[in-house]
Image (spheres, helix red, strand yellow):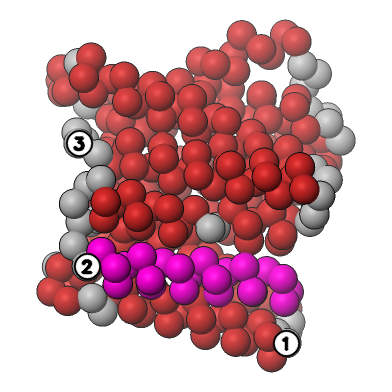
Amino acid sequence: MSPLVFAVVLAAAGLHAAWNALVKQGGDPFLRLAVVILTGSLVCLPLLPFVAPPPAAAWPWLLGSVAIHIAYDSFLCLAYRRGDLSLAYPVARGIAPPLVALSGFLVAGERLSPAGLAAVAVVSAGILLLVGLGRVARAQRASLLWAALCGVTIALYTLCDGQGVRAAGEPWGYIVWLFALDGLPFGTAVLWLERHRLDGLATPGLVPAVVGGLLSFAAYAMVVWAMATTPMALVSALRETSVVLAAWIGVRHLGEPFGRRRIAAASLVAAGVVLLKLAG
């Protein structure tokens, strides 16, 4: 991985944690996330005439990613509605790599190296530590379930976009078309279904959501650009360092409990994910 790609992906991890914090911080997560992803679509729609449409080989991956993102968005909102950022975010981001490793073993007979098994153990220990932190965590079991399902969708859309941007051959066209389409189904559906509660998106709540949308676009565009030239496993591993920052934001700025222990547990999750990707 080149120093430029390393810096870009690390910056993307920070932006990703930041926009998740903006979705979680106050107001209904569904309304905030609807504005976040619609902002990304509105940014990209005017750019469509200036980029080439993805070739036919990339469209199944792109449309698959859009469909999976609908489930991801829904699970993420449900997790944030019921639980803390410093709990739900590390579980969602950390559970995907061990699930991919397990499915590879069960379906394809792929066996992890000793280093890979150790990495899975580290990730699992970090998640178990998060789940076991006192009565607050036990009161958020529903959030943990939604976060785990969110982790499944993360693994799926990462695969789709990694394959899609390579099939496209040119990353920027794929990125612009992905973001132009991605926010429309979930965003418009939520705003229509929740139209009687749109007063909750008055200026004090709308501005952070729009900023979150800009951060979301920048963060994922940077990741997809990196996957065009760098192995997906390395990009995905470095990106998951965002769990440490998200835990810190939840504890420091949102006043969530078990501060030091949650940050330590999130650090374990991040370290395990990096080791797993590098061992794979």
Label pair 1/2, CB-CB below 8 angstroms: no
Residue 254: % across, % down? 22, 47
Mark 3 nearby-residue class (10 Å; few <14, some 14–19, many ≥20): few
- The number of numbered badges drawn on the structure is 3
Asked if residue 144 lies left or right of residue 198, the reply is: right
Say whether disc 2 or disc 3 marks the residue closer to the N-terminus: 3
Q: Which residues are magenta?
A: 259-280
**Residue at 60 percent of width and 87 percent of height:** 118
Residue 104: % across, % down? 67, 76
**Residue at 64 percent of width and 74 percent of height:** 276
User: Which quadrant holds the N terminus?
Assistant: bottom right
Residue 15: % across, % down? 50, 39
Q: Nearer the viewer, mark 2 or mark 3?
A: 2
Please name the residue that numbered disc 2 is placed on: 258
The three-letter amino acid code for the residue at tag 2 is Phe
Separation of disc 2 and disc 3 at Cα? Answer: 20 Å
Please name the residue that numbered disc 3 is placed on: 26
Label pair 3/1, CB-CB below 8 angstroms: no
Mark 1 nearby-residue class (10 Å; few <14, some 14–19, many ≥20): few
Near-viewer residue (229 or 70): 229
Assess whether residue 261 is covered by the magenta stretch: yes
**Where is 168 relative to 116, above or below?**
above
Please name the residue that numbered disc 1 is placed on: 113
Say whether disc 1 or disc 2 marks the residue closer to the N-terminus: 1
Near-viewer residue (140 or 134): 134
The three-letter amino acid code for the residue at tag 1 is Ser
**Residue at 72 percent of width and 76 percent of height:** 279
**Quarter assignment of residue 126:** bottom left
